[in-house]
Amino acid sequence: MSSLALINEFLGQPPNASSHGYQIDHILEFCHWFMAALFIGWSAFFIFVLIRFRKRRQPGADHMGVRSGISTHLEFSVVLIEAVLLLGFAIPLWAKRVNQFPPGKEALVVHVVAQQFSFNYHLPGPDGQFGRRDVGFVSNSNPLGLDPNDPAGKDDIVTTGELHVPVNRPVIAELSSKDVIHDFFLPSMRIAGDAIPGSLIPVWFTPIKTGTDEVICGQLCGLGHYGMKGTLVVDTPQDYEAWLKERAELSGTQTTPPPPTQRPPGEPPSGPTPGTIPLPGAPKPPNSGEQPKASPGAPQQPAQPAQSPGQL
Ligand SMILES: [Cu+2]
């Protein structure tokens, strides 16, 4: 805990776990203290003006206005401090994030594919090569559409919800989305990036502490947005290797899940994700609660009486 991080802690910011995060924390903390000083200064000035220029004491308006130059100096100082913060600290830090990526060989590259309402991760496996992906191969058992005919994709690792990374090694996450705009936000790593359909947006960070951190979606992406959370586990290099090995073995033995008609009772049916708004003109899902209108005089036919919503 740093004695200078009082406001960051007060605002509930999780402890930093990345190599660049302390720079962001310093800027955040300084900005908050600066804003607090401005708030107190402007509030004091406002109260002073209310008392000093009250009508009883100043019955006539002074058309000359302020004669002292102190307010000009104060305002210039505020602008100068803000310009130094922006041009001297914030922009260089941002430029380093977006321009100075670590070399691909040194870094761990992972594809992050967001969807309503989870994050999928695609790792290249022992051969270090990502298999080809195509939207035509997307299915329940192949959420990222890995091409089964591509030899580079045979050993690839695909996980949902939980990502493991080794400590003290740069991680480049290439972000994309299957449906709407999401945001891959790692609060403890002080990094975030939008996942946009049709775009590949890289972000990078270097974890410096082992442990479990939270991954959240930072864009309002639908009714289930509140539950779009995941886990980032920062492992020691040995634990990471063990996890990779375990995942590689699992990916070799995974079986295709049963088709929707053979699913166990209680499991949600396939179709649009609950909470999403169907496109205009899209076919209505069965049992959507809307009864077909009967023509006047015709006997009412109950639609699928065995599954009507009122029956239990
Ligand atoms: Cu989202």
Image: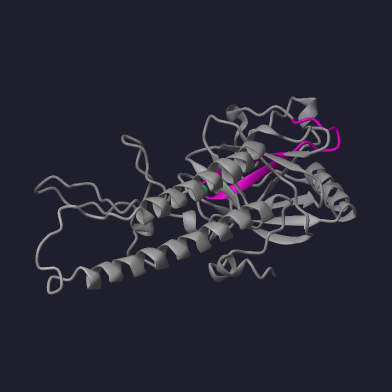
> Residue 259 in the image: x percent, y percent?
60, 44
Is residue 256 left or right of 11 when viewed as pictured? right
> Residue 40 in the image: x percent, y percent?
41, 68
Q: Residue at x 83, y 37 (%)?
A: 106
- Name the image quarter holding residue 172: top right
Is residue 312 left or right of 230 when viewed as pictured? left
Looking at the figure, which quarter contains the C terminus?
bottom left
Magenta span covers which residues? Answer: 110-130
139 or 213: nearer the viewer: 213
Does the magenta-highlighted stretch encompass residue 127?
yes
Q: Residue at x 43, y 50 (%)?
A: 222
60 or 303: nearer the viewer: 60
Does the magenta-highlighted stretch encompass residue 175?
no
Visual colour scheme: one colour
300 or 24: nearer the viewer: 24
Residue 48 in view of the camera: yes
Question: Residue 47, relative to residue 264: is it above or below?
Answer: below
> Residue 5 in the image: x percent, y percent?
62, 66
Looking at the figure, which quarter contains the N terminus?
bottom right
Is residue 283 left or right of 148 when viewed as pictured? left
